[in-house]
Structure formats: C-alpha cells, structure tokens
Amino acid sequence: MHTLERSRLRGVSGTETDCAACPGSRRCWGDNLAAEAVYARREPPLERGARLIEQGQQPALYIVATGCLVLRVSLPDGSQRVVGLRLPGELVGLESYARGEQAYTAQAATASAVCRLRLPAPGAGGAHGALLERLLMKSAAQPERASAPWAGLPAVERVAAFIENYTQRAQLSGREDPFKLPLTRADIGSYLGLAPETVVRALGHLSQAQRLAVRGRTVRLGGPA
C-alpha cells in the first residue's frame, strides 16, 4: 500500500462515529442499533500477523469489521494455545472489562479491519448501562461461549466440524466457491487439541472421502465439482 494511501486511512481511522452511520452496522449489531448509541473508531488496517492486543494489556474493546483474528493465551511453560477466532461482527476484548486486563493476545490471521468501541465507565447507569448490558449479551452469544461443536468427536470429525463452523460464522457457502482457511495446520491443531500431523491426516481423509477438496489452505466443501 502506498504511503499516501496509508496516511489517508490513518486519518479516517482517528474519527469516532456512531455505528448507526456505518453501512456495515446490520452485520455487527442487527436491526435494532438505534436502541442505544454505539460509538466506535476505525483502527488502522491490520496486516496478517499484526497484533491488535496483547495478553495483560489495559482494557479495550473492539469489533471485527473484516478479516479474521486468532486469540492466543500464553501458558506458564512459555507456550501458547489458540483459544478462539473472531470474525466480522464479533467482539474482541470484552473480558478485559471485568478482569481489568486483556485475557488473551489477538492477532490478525488475515488482513483485517477492526473498530474500537467506546466502553462505558464502570458503574455507569442509564443509556450507558443499557449499552453495557447489550455488549454482554452480544458477547455471551458468540460461538466460543457455547460448547464447541467438535467437543468429544474423533479427530477427523473434529476437523470437519471446525471447518463447517468456520464457514457458517464467516457466511461462506464453501461449495460454489473455494475459500482459504485463516489458520495454519498447527494453529488448527492447537485450537482443536490435536497434533498438527493429526490435522494433516484428517484433512487427507476428508479429501479422500470427497467431503472436502484441499489444496494448501484452500478448501472446497463437498470435494471437486
């Protein structure tokens, strides 16, 4: 991206606006955004691999506009574990509101754009309290809050359930048009509790069974046309 274009994007991203004025507001908030004003500031674009927040940082709340973020938690032995994904319309960092610090590191798995939301002050009442309640309800409805659809499944079905869950959340058909998985085999394994080699074998099995067509990170559901 040219320097002038980057500068222009950063200038736009510094302006806080009401989400109701955004063309993507329905994707993020549904049809009843006007119930309480939600103010957000578009952040500079995130290139793949860029970090939005670090585990342990001060509270901040974001919503994904485009792309995909992967959430990682640092463990006491120094390793990291993938604990979730965030896709367009999903919140990042609300856990920090109660904890007082970020619960995980959020990194762009693909080129992404996010908006930073104006977080109500603790103890705020009235409209601010209503907004916080809505944010909590939205966060509670996000997929990681429920039981993972692959829990307890054998490795092949676990990988298949992950891919199906991703296509649903990303609103991809996956059958008419191939798509790219946002995670590496190692990250998928970390997320699902499988070794990377097991993920590779599971994808191979699904491909042989013509449930998927796989080439690198590109996947087509149902196998070749």
Image: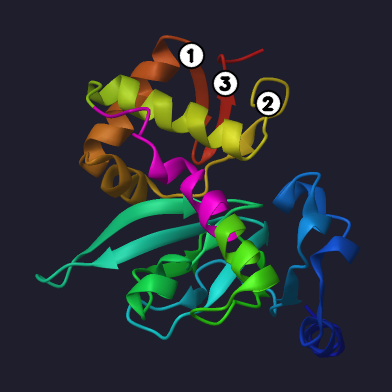
**Nearer to us: label 3 or label 2:** 2
Coordinates of residue 30 in the picture (x, y in percent): 75, 45
Callout 3 touching callout 2 (CB < 8 Å):
yes
> Dot 2, how many residues are within 10 Å of its Cα: few (below 14), some (14-19), or many (20+)?
some
Lower position in the chain sequence, tag 3 or tag 2: 2
In the rendered image, the vertical position of residue 180 relative to residue 160, given as above or below: below
Question: Within the magenta stretch, is there residue 44?
Answer: no
Considering depth in this image, is 138 or 210 the residue closer to the camera? 138
Q: In this view, does 11 lie to the left or right of 79?
A: right
Instruction: Tell me the quarter of the picture where residue 175 sits.
Output: top right
Considering depth in this image, is 17 or 148 the residue closer to the camera? 17
Lower position in the chain sequence, tag 1 or tag 2: 2
Q: Label 3's element? A: strand
Q: Label 2's element? A: loop
What amino acid type is highlighted by mark number 3?
A: Leu
The residue that label 1 is drawn on is 211
What amino acid type is highlighted by mark number 2?
A: Ser
User: Which of the image's four quarters has the N terminus?
Assistant: bottom right
The residue that label 3 is drawn on is 221
Which residue is depicted at the point 41% across and 25% down? 161
The residue that label 2 is drawn on is 173
In the rendered image, the vertical position of residue 205 relative to residue 66, given as above or below: above
> Dot 3, how many residues are within 10 Å of its Cα: few (below 14), some (14-19), or many (20+)?
many
Q: Label 1's element? A: loop
> Dot 1, how many residues are within 10 Å of its Cα: few (below 14), some (14-19), or many (20+)?
some
What segment carries the magenta color?
135-151
Lower position in the chain sequence, tag 3 or tag 1: 1
